Amino acid sequence: MGGGLPSLGTILVLWPVIKRLLHSKLGLAILGIGAVAYFGGFLNLSSLTGGGGSHKVVDEGVDNEQAAFIKTVLADTEAVWSEVFSQAGRRYPPPTLVLYRGSSASGCGTASANMGPFYCPQDQKVYVDLGFFTDMKEQYGAGGDFSHAYVLAHEVGHHVQNLEGTLDQVQRAKQQVLGKAKKNKLQVKLELQADCYAGIWANHAQQQFDMLEEGDLEEALVAAAAIGDDRLQKQSQGFAIPHTFTHGSSKQRVEWFAKGVKNGQLSDCDTFGEQ
């Protein structure tokens, strides 16, 4: 396989749809809000959105500039999803973020660096090994702060799915189907919906909080393409096996993220209605 991203053509096709969302205030927001997050350990944005409570961060000795940025993004996801849930007459209980390097204990078993970031519904925590972002840049060519923000927003998307009952529904559906391929197909739909939810966050972060900088969404699109199952399989073994996909192809991940960005509506993220 070559070193380029296989879905950059798709990115270019979709780019005009989302380009209108781009402005230039995320950098200033990170300098201001990120400083608070860095020195205070966390930032409570619930007062800005009308939501109750504040998010929690467990920092296992990795409190640095990168960790501060991730904490700031978590605060932004809380602001966005608190607003979305409030519009539906519901309260948004945010997940806890666990930042670590190497390994950590989770409600879903041991969290290790080779697993990548993940969400555990048992303890409602998002686990992020910061070394994963180095791998994204060096191995997959997906660098930039907003690529990191996309990854966290995707995992928070799984938290939203948990609150909606979608994770339980998919788990039950997996138990009722025969064959690994069908189970994988359900998992792909779940992951693509989390990508779409990440897009909803990006839409609202710009439209309501004016937090995005020009080029931010492009970084997220490149990250989505970089960690598509087809690209990862081709990189590791030289070919892709679609029925073994668990997260979706590069094209699918880019398209569903872009769908969430376009209108910022939960109704646009029905991946399970897609055949």
Image (spheres, rainbow, N blue to C red):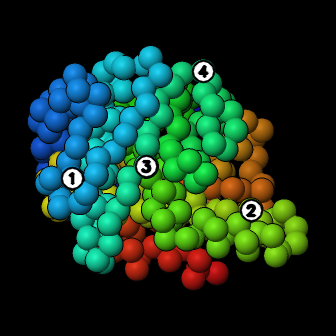
Relative vertical location of residue 196 with respect to residue 9 in this rendering, above or below: below
Q: Please state, as top left, top right, bottom left or bottom right, where the N terminus lies in the image.
A: top right
Q: Return the x and y of residue 260 as percentages of the image width and height.
A: 37, 66
Per the rendering, the mark at residue 102 is 4
Contact between labelled residues 4 and 1, with CB atoms less than 8 Å apart: no
Residue 174 in sight in this render: yes
Alpha carbon distance from label 3 to label 2: 26 Å
Which residue is the site of mark 2? Answer: 184
- Residue appearing at x 45%, y 62% in the figure: 160
- Residue appearing at x 53%, y 63% in the figure: 162
Crowding around mark 1 (Cα neighbors within 10 Å: few <14, some 14 to 19, many 20+) is many
Contact between labelled residues 1 and 2, with CB atoms less than 8 Å apart: no
Crowding around mark 2 (Cα neighbors within 10 Å: few <14, some 14 to 19, many 20+) is some
Which residue is the site of mark 3? Answer: 95
Relative vertical location of residue 3 with respect to residue 51 in this rendering, above or below: above
| Amino acid type at mark 1 | Ser
Alpha carbon distance from label 2 to label 1: 37 Å
In the image, 267 versus 7, the foreground residue is 267
Which residue is the site of mark 1? Answer: 46
